[in-house]
Amino acid sequence: MTWKELIESQNVKYAVLIIASLIIAFIASFIIRKIITVFNKRYSKKLNVDSTNLSFLKNSVSFILYTAAAIYIFYNIPALHSLGTGLFAGAGIAAVVIGFAAQKAFSNIISGIFILIFKPFSVGDTIEIGEKRKGIVEEITLRHIMIRDYENRRILIPNSIISDETIINSSIIDEKIRQFVEFGISYDSDVDTATKIIREEAEKHPDFIDNRKKDEKKNKIPSVIIRLTSLDDFSVQLRAYVWVKNNDTGFTLKCDILKSVKKRFEKEGIEIPFPYRTIVYKNDSDISKTQK
C-alpha cells in the first residue's frame, strides 16, 4: 500500500468516525428526549417528580450529547490536535471575540440554571411577566421559557430578561385567589341594598369558595366582604372580595357576577350611573349669551 493510499484510508476512517459520532449523538438525543417526555406525562405526578426539572433536562440533552460527540472527535483524530493547539494559542483574542458574541447566550444559560435552582415558577404555573405577558408555563429551556397565553399563542421570553423582571405567580404555594369585582352605583341608590345583592349573587356562584376560618364563621363575618372604596364624581364605588380556586376560575366568576348583579340592579332599582354634566347659569345675561 502506497503512502497516498494510506492517507486516503485514514481520511475515510476519520470521516466515518465523525459521521458515526454525530449520528449516535442524534439517535441518543432523540431516544432520551422521547423517554423523558413519556415519563413526564405518565409517571411524574405518581412518583412526585418535579416536571420542571424533567423539562429542563430534556431540553439540555441535545446540547450535552453533541458537546460530548465533539470532544470525542477531537480526542480521536490526531489531525485535530494541532487545530486544538492553535485554538488554545490564540485563546486570548478568541476568548474576547467569542465572549462578546456569546454574551447573551451565556447569560441566558446561567439564568436558566438559576431558574431551575431557585424555582420562581414551574411548568404548568400561571405567571405574569411585565405587561401583557401572562399565561401558563409550557417549557423551560437553556435559552428561554415558553408561555401559552390566553389567546393560545406561544410567547418565548429569554431567560436573562426573566431574571430582571418582576414575576407574578398565581400557582405557587396556594392557587386560591381573592378576586376583586367592582361596581359603581348612583348617589341616589341605597348602598346597603346594593351590598346585599352583590353578596347574594357572589355566594350563589358555583365557583365561589367560603374561605373563612372557624372563628370568623363563629363571629358571623360575611363570606364575601364588600367595601365602599371611593366616592367618585358620578358614582359610589363598591368592591367585592370573592375567593375562588385559581386565576382562570376567578376571571369566569367575575364576568358571571357582573352580569347577574346588573340584572338584579335593574329589577330592584339600583342605578348604575353614566357620566353627565350639570350646567349652572349665574344670571339671565349668561343665558342670552349662550342662545346667540
Image: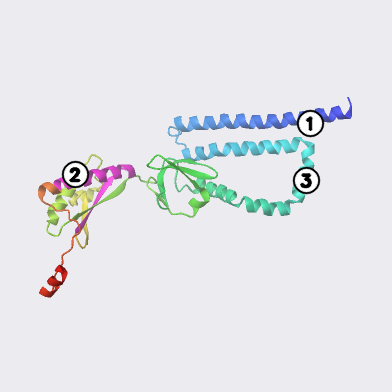
Q: CA distance from mark 2 to mark 3?
A: 76 Å
Badge 3: few (under 14), some or many (20 or more) residues near its Cα, within 10 Å?
A: few
Q: Going from the N terminus, do you reach mark 1 or mark 2 first?
A: 1
Q: CA distance from mark 1 to mark 3?
A: 20 Å
Residue drawn where x is 12% and y is 71% of the image? 288
**Vertical placement of residue 109 versus 68, above or below:** below
Q: Going from the N terminus, do you reach mark 2 or mark 3 first?
A: 3
Q: Dot 2: what SS? A: helix
Badge 2: few (under 14), some or many (20 or more) residues near its Cα, within 10 Å?
A: some
Is 133 situated left or right of 35 in this image? left
- Start-end of magenta stretch: 235-264
Question: On the image, numbered disc 3 is attached to which residue?
Answer: 85
- Give 132 or 125, whichever is nearer the viewer: 132
Q: Going from the N terminus, do you reach mark 1 or mark 3 first?
A: 1
Q: Would residue 67 be seen by someone viewing this image from the given angle? A: yes
Q: Dot 3: what SS? A: helix
Check disc 3 and give the amino acid type: Thr
Given this view, does label 2 or label 3 mark the residue nearer the observer?
Answer: 2
Res. 11 mark: 1
Q: How far across and down, in percent of the image, does residue 256 sit?
A: 23, 43
Residue drawn where x is 47% and y is 38% of the image? 51
> Quick one: quadrant of the N terminus?
top right
Q: Are marks 1 and 3 in contact (CB under 8 Å)?
A: no
Q: Is residue 243 magenta?
A: yes
Q: Would residue 43 be seen by someone viewing this image from the given angle? A: no
Check disc 2 and give the amino acid type: Ser
Check disc 1 and give the amino acid type: Asn
Given this view, does label 1 or label 3 mark the residue nearer the observer?
Answer: 1
